[in-house]
Amino acid sequence: MMWGGFFAVLLLALMPHAILSAEQLEVEAVYEWKQMVFGFATEADRQDAIDNGNLSPENATPIDVAVHQDCEKGSRVFTTIPRFTTGIPYTLAVVTEANEANGPVLQPYPDYSWHNSNGSDCDKITSVFRVAITECNQLFVLDSGVIAQVQRCSPQLLVFDLNSDTLSYRYRFDPSTYTAAASLFITPTVSVNDPPPTGSCSKVQVYMTDVALHGLVVYDSELNTAWRIQNRFMYPNPENGVHSLAGELFTLMDGIFGLASDDEQLYFHPLASVHEYAVPLSVVSNRTIFENNSGAMPLAFRQVATRSSSCAAEAIDSQNNIYCVTFNPVMLTRWNPNKPYNVQMPADPQLLEFVSGMKVYKTHTGNEELWMMSNRYQKVANGNLDFNEVNFRIVRRSLDDVQNATN
């Protein structure tokens, strides 16, 4: 692959559509909420949340979605509810099939006891924005340690065994990788270098965004250490800090936000930006490069694409198609970095008003699906959510037509 061709700036939203040989599929809503519904395993757990002032569903905004299939437990859909404020009884949940008037009932993961300290016990889970599930049946939970903008605990990375739903590993980040009350760790993506069936899942790199202090943190399981990386492309662009979404304006000056990786590149973008950037994995995965200088090798980072407007979460499939949903217009976009065009995929914009979480999930049959969390953040930011309307959705789209099509 020629570097010059790879790093050409691509105008994603302005290029012609590709013509697909297969009928294009639609985005479908799997779960919908007017307001989040917190369930509890026991009435004592519910009463504990009430007594501590931590059961205010109107304060809850779901951010991420992740799906896991197990031969014994079946299919489970996880979501996260960061503690932007008080009133959130738990910050990591499983969506159940039980329904109430406002939507499906959640249950805490792995159980309520992991969440009920509200930041007073740093051995528990404090506040989670996003998670990652690997082919090793492991759930990587990135705990920011922040509640209502207060750093209650150090950020930590928790790894749960999804076969037993028990904690298999914990890593607490050293102060050299973050600044308390200024950093905010929100997005992890995981590369397993020795996957099953032949590997032991012991060689793992986790790439994480510090959205508030505009940095990338990399954890290496073999070295059992993490390091921080800084680059100018991780900062927000003030010209892209005011967003138009579904007819509403809101300001969100977030830095490095979305992450996706293939075997060679780590792709990323700030939320307040219309550009996509990339850096070779071989660079960011090398601790020695950044050991004494977090801003080392600035020229290894490149702008690789330009969109019509900002997008939040992104994901990549097994064919290296990168997906995101732009704000204005609301549009599901697919882009393959090896091709000089994009595909704007048909989707009902009401289902995708602010896609804060996005994952590619491989089903037990080997097919891939794009799962997304849509949370109407523009209304959250403006304080005008109407709880008589559907405000939060988990949606999915099969990728069969994309991956089996000829151009």
Image (spheres, grey):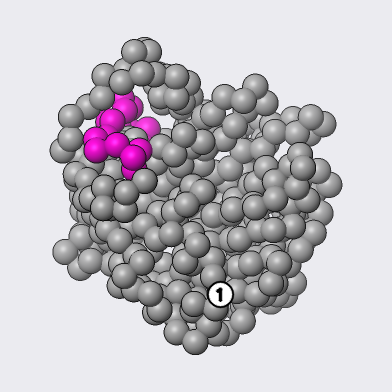
Quadrant showing the C terminus: top left
The residue shown at (28%, 43%) is: 326
Q: In this view, does 110 lie to the left or right of 217?
A: right
Which residue occupies the foreground of this view, 98 or 76?
Answer: 76
Membership of 341 in magenta stretch: yes
Where residue 53 sits, quadrant-wise, is bottom right
User: Helix, strand or loop at disc 1?
Assistant: helix
- The amino acid beneath tag 1 is Arg
Q: Residue furthest front?
A: 2
Find residue 402 and report its horizontal and vertical position in percent.
40, 24
Magenta residues span 336-352
Find residue 306 and report its horizontal and vertical position in percent.
22, 50
Numbered circles on residues, count: 1
- Residue 191 makes an appearance in the image: yes
Indicate whether 127 appears above or below 260: below
Which residue occupies the foreground of this view, 217 or 60?
Answer: 217
The residue shown at (31%, 53%) is: 3
Find residue 163 and report its horizontal and vertical position in percent.
81, 43
Q: How crowded is mark 1: few (under 14 residues within 10 Å), some or many (20 or more)?
A: some
Find residue 392 and report its horizontal and vertical position in percent.
45, 41
Which residue occupies the foreground of this view, 190 or 171?
Answer: 190
Indicate whether 337 appears above or below 369: below
The residue shown at (51%, 36%) is: 318
Where residue 175 sits, quadrant-wise, is bottom right
Membership of 329 in magenta stretch: no
